[in-house]
Image: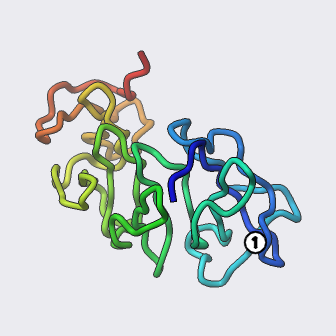
Amino acid sequence: MRLAGAFVLAALAAEGRPGWPRREGAALGLGEARRRAPAGARGPSDECGGAGGDVFVYLDERGESAFDGRFCGARAFSDGLAAVWRDRKYGFIDKSGTSAIPPLYEVVGDFSEGLAAVKLDGREKSWSFIDKTGRIVIPAVGDGRAEKFERGLAAIDIDSPNGYLAASAVWGYVDRTGRIVARFTRARSFRW
């Protein structure tokens, strides 16, 4: 099914109908949808407990389900893919609702410039970056946080024994080959 407009992420109300539409930032390419709905609009689910408890659907511009599928811990589409929680792990779906990358990760970032930061185990300190096929392109970088790629670089926490916001924390930028190209204190992703 091809859609002319943007998708909207909606939490399901308890009876299974779409609840509060997630309009702020939920349109394609406009960032991550909010995870918390106001009281009464939540769709709690035992299988979604590790992803915040909400069940989500993607709606088209008419407010109808954009494709079959109910998802836990769903996020807005970013760079053509959206992170969804299935089987107690995160994976990614494409704009048709089809699984593009199977649920393998405990922690994920959004795709940007064809790469996303992921952790197979949430207790790991370092992040890896995968491409849109799920192949690890940059293995194990950073010490606690990784930002998305912008203009060919991603800000990463290189060394933070006292926390990534501590004055002693060392941040830097990693390029698409995994090489650390600069070191800073408290570096952030580019916002041009």
Q: Residue 191: horizontal and vertical position, in percent?
A: 43, 20
Give the colour scheme shown: rainbow
Give the residue type at disc 1. Answer: Gly
Q: Residue 142: horizontal and vertical position, in percent?
A: 25, 46
> Which quadrant of the figure has residue 17?
bottom right
> From this viewpoint, is residue 53 visible?
yes
Q: Nearer the viewer, residue 191 or 97?
A: 97
Q: Nearer the viewer, residue 158 or 17?
A: 17
Relative side of 100 to 36, left or right: left
Relative side of 20 to 24, left or right: right
> Which quadrant of the figure has residue 184?
top left
The residue lying at 35 percent from left, 27 percent from top is 187
The residue lying at 25 percent from left, 51 percent from top is 129
Residue 11 vertical position relative to residue 33 in the rendered view, above or below: below
Q: Label 1's element?
A: loop
Q: Residue 94: horizontal and vertical position, in percent?
A: 42, 58
> Which quadrant of the figure has residue 139?
bottom left
Tell which residue pokes out farthest to the right in this image: 40
Q: Nearer the viewer, residue 58 or 13?
A: 58
Relative side of 181 to 155, left or right: left
The residue lying at 20 percent from left, 35 percent from top is 174
The residue carrying mark 1 is 43
Q: Nearer the viewer, residue 179 or 100?
A: 100
Question: Badge 1: few (under 14), some or many (20 or more) residues near its Cα, within 10 Å?
Answer: many
Q: How many marks?
A: 1
Residue 93 vertical position relative to residue 159 in the rendered view, above or below: below
